Amino acid sequence: MKKSLIALAALAASGAAMAQSSVTLFGVADATFAYGTGTVSKKTQLASGGLDGSRLGFRGVEDLGGGMSASFHLEAGLNNDDGTGGTTDTNNQGKAASGGLIFNRRSTLSLNGGFGEVRLGRDYTPHFKNLTAFDPFGTSGVGTTQTYMSSIGGPTKARASNSIGYLLPDNLGGFYGQGQFYMGENNSNVVNKKDGNGVSLRAGYANGPIDVAGSFAKTTYLLNVTQGMPTGGNITTMNFGGKYDLGMVKILGQYSQDKVIGTGTGKGLLGGVQIPVGPAGQVRLSYSTYKVVTVGANTLDPVSSKIAAGYVHNLSKRTAVYGTFANVTNKKGASQALNGSDTAPNKKSSGFDFGIRHSF
């Protein structure tokens, strides 16, 4: 009898502890029939992520009392067309690793409270969040803004590993912001000991129909010199964006700049709209361009410009079908191609996505 009472007490205590925390399984499965054509080759494939990146994740939160909580977020990229996992960059220096289920999209542990959030681990960089927030296609699929596709922003243009981040609390009257420091984790006795170290900052204001924000980032890389010519060093990125919701149409725009010591400066522009169609549809249109002003005499300054048009129809809150068409024009030696195709310098490329996305 005594043992039974002890067991019941332990079970009750365990239930009370579990009631203070929660764990959620979530994900996205996005299958895309993708086609790309260029002057050199064409490609047809069943791909993944035409509307949203396919993923599998786990997130949880524990109430610590006094307005504080601890949380985690583990998110693995998936290619649901063949079942493989994604790739990751372990040290912010382009050394990718791939395998089965790896949490390459996000792997963070956070402490939350009235002060905001302190977040540790692999995460989106604030300057990427500012880029994707103002792209009508959300940097997914063939319509992804050329300011990202042509970017010379290096390994941390989307995510950074080994990061320490801070996010402002949500109750600041529409103001929001984030800061992040990330490390390359090299030994102190090597010549490139600072490679992969960086800082990224973002600040913005959202109120009613208006949302505007800007970001700045700098990542350290050793300047390499080959036959007396520099081949790349520190990367400085800045971008500014905004959107205005008129109800019948949402207008989006952005400017971006990436400066790489020894290589050149990339400058990009985007303008686009999102137009609701009935209760379940949305038309998405954009024009984006990116030019790289290269270092050195007698060099070309490649330019790629993209027009993209798409439609999304929500069959339910979780499931949508979509189609996107894009065409990219290359000048001054650029050779950007779409959906795995290949095109010669200064030639065009086009592509389309047709797919279905289900979130859970």
Image (cartoon, helix red, strand yellow):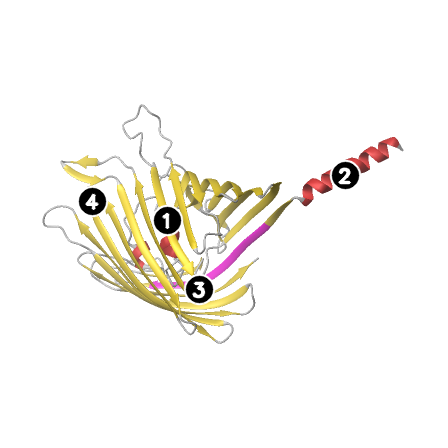
Q: Nearer the viewer, residue 84 or 192?
A: 192
- Magenta segment's dominant SS is strand
Q: Secondary structure at mark 4?
A: loop
Q: Residues within 10 Å of mark 1 (few under 14, many from 20)?
A: many
Give the Cα separation between the discs numbered 4 and 3: 41 Å
Residue drawn where x is 77% and y is 35% of the image: 10
Give residue 62's quadrant in the image: top right
Residue drawn where x is 66% and y is 44% of the image: 20
Percent of width and height locating residue 21: 64, 44
Q: Nearer the viewer, residue 326 or 60?
A: 60
**First of labels 3, 1 by sequence position:** 1
State whether residue 182 is above or below residue 36: above
State whether residue 323 is above or below residue 90: below
**First of labels 2, 3 by sequence position:** 2
Residue drawn where x is 31% and y is 32% of the image: 194
Asked if the residue at tag 3 contacts the one at tag 2, i.e. Cβ–Cβ closer than 8 Å, the answer is no
Q: Secondary structure at mark 1?
A: strand
Residues in magenta, as a range: 25-36
In the image, is residue 30 part of the stretch drawn in magenta?
yes
Amino acid at the residue labelled 2: Leu
Query: To which residue does mark 2 refer?
Result: 11
In the picture, the quarter occupied by the N terminus is top right
Give the Cα separation between the discs numbered 4 and 1: 25 Å
* Residue 143 appearing in the image: no
Amino acid at the residue labelled 4: Thr
State whether residue 317 is above or below residue 256: below
Give residue 284's quadrant in the image: bottom left
Amino acid at the residue labelled 3: Gly
**First of labels 4, 1 by sequence position:** 1
Give the Cα separation between the discs numbered 2 and 3: 48 Å
Query: To which residue does mark 4 refer?
Result: 263
**First of labels 4, 3 by sequence position:** 3
